[in-house]
Image (tube, rainbow, N blue to C red):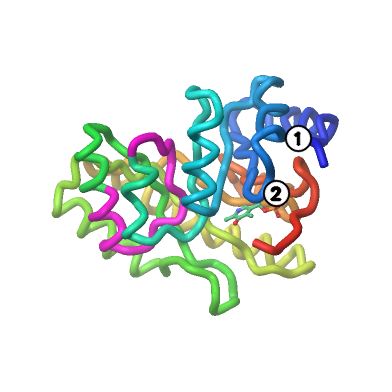
């Protein structure tokens, strides 16, 4: 229980000013979030809609909430009023719903497209061709209440650092290619890659945003 403050300070120093730390607080109580908040931390990541809605209601309004789980279209409406960045968008259907709910709330919601880089079949995300198609569709449809600000990806769950590095490199290449051709409401600046086990490798490969949970908050009782 409790937050590892030493680790937090160490990671913040390691990341420097150019990389954002999203503290992944899923399954952890609001008190733990407060502990980091009181050290000046404002970016927190959650995976489950109901849990995020509950925490948002209890915690300070200047927290930037990142939704990092797999978002179902029918649940977008619950987080649309306040969410700061949605990391795992991988379909036109979801983008369309986010845009609709953002418009209802009279705001623009920033999202990251999830790119499939791991070998595992189970991981969500788009391949390089699908990214291109989705970006084209997004631009054609002129979704004014959504902004695509970058990509996110998860490497294979393996101890093989070389393999993880290759997967992150692959994502960085796709990112750099697309970052050159910016359409309206597509401003690719954020590359969200790296978690507790592989964030050091992600930093070496050009990550601008890491999502770290267990190193800060301790192991979770159930996986995810
Ligand atoms: C849970 C989760 C994290 C954080 O995982 P840790 O290994 O605890 O750092 C990061 N990204 C996503 C998408 C997650 O679901």
Tell me the quarter of the picture where residue 132 sits: bottom left
Direction from residue 68 to residue 184 in the image, left or right: left
Residue drawn at x 67%, y 51% is 195
Tell me the quarter of the picture where residue 167 sits: bottom right
Direction from residue 132 to residue 12 in the image, left or right: right
Indicate whether 201 appears above or below 154: above
- What residue sits right under mark 1 in the picture? 11
Tell me the quarter of the picture where residue 82 sits: top left
- Quadrant containing the C terminus is bottom right
Q: Is mark 2 on a helix, strand or loop?
A: helix
Ligand 1 found in image quarter:
bottom right
Q: Position of residue 118 (x, y in %)?
A: 58, 70
Residue at disc 2, CB closer than 8 Å to ligand 1? yes
The residue nearer to you, when weighing 192 against 205, is 192
Residue located farthest toward the bottom when viewing the structure as drawn: 121
The disc, 2 or 1, on the residue closer to the chain's N-terminal end is 1
Q: What stretch is highlighted in magenta?
A: 81-98
Indicate whether 101 appears above or below 163: above
Q: Position of residue 37 (x, y in %)?
A: 65, 25
The residue nearer to you, when weighing 120 against 98, is 98
Residue drawn at x 20%, y 39% is 104
Badge 2: how crowded within 10 Å, few (<14), some, or many (20+)? some
Cα distance, mark 2 to mark 1? Answer: 10 Å
Magenta run includes residue 161:
no
Magenta run includes residue 85:
yes
The residue nearer to you, when weighing 105 against 209, is 105
Q: Where is residue 131 in the image (x, y as percent from the top left)?
A: 35, 62
Disc number for residue 98: none
Disc number for residue 199: 2
The reply to whether discs 2 and 1 touch (Cβ–Cβ < 8 Å) is yes
Direction from residue 218 to residue 142 in the image, left or right: left
Q: Position of residue 171 (x, y in %)?
A: 52, 58
């Amino acid at each position: 229980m409790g937050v590892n403050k030493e680790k937090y300070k160490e990671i913040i120093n390691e990341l420097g000013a150019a990389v954002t730390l999203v503290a992944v607080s899923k399954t952890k109580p609001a008190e733990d979030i407060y502990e980091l908040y009181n050290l000046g931390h404002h970016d927190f990541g959650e995976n489950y809609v109901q849990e995020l809605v509950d925490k948002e209601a209890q915690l300070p309004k200047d927290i930037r909430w990142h939704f990092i789980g797999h978002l179902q279209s029918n649940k977008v409406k619950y987080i649309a009023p306040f969410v700061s960045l949605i990391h795992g968008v991988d379909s036109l259907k979801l983008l369309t719903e986010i845009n609709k709910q953002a418009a209802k709330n009279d705001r623009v919601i920033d999202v990251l497209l999830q790119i499939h880089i791991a070998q595992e079949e189970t991981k969500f995300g788009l391949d390089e061709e699908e990214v291109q198609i989705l970006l084209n569709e997004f631009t054609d449809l002129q979704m004014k209440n959504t902004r695509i600000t970058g990509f996110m990806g998860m490497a294979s769950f393996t101890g093989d650092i070389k393999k993880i590095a290759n997967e992150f490199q692959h994502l960085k290449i796709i990112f750099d290619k697309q970052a050159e051709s910016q359409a309206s409401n597509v401003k690719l600046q954020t590359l969200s890659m790296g978690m507790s086990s592989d964030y050091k490798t992600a930093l070496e490969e050009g990550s601008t945003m890491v999502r770290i949970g267990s190193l800060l908050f301790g192991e979770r009782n159930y996986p995810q």
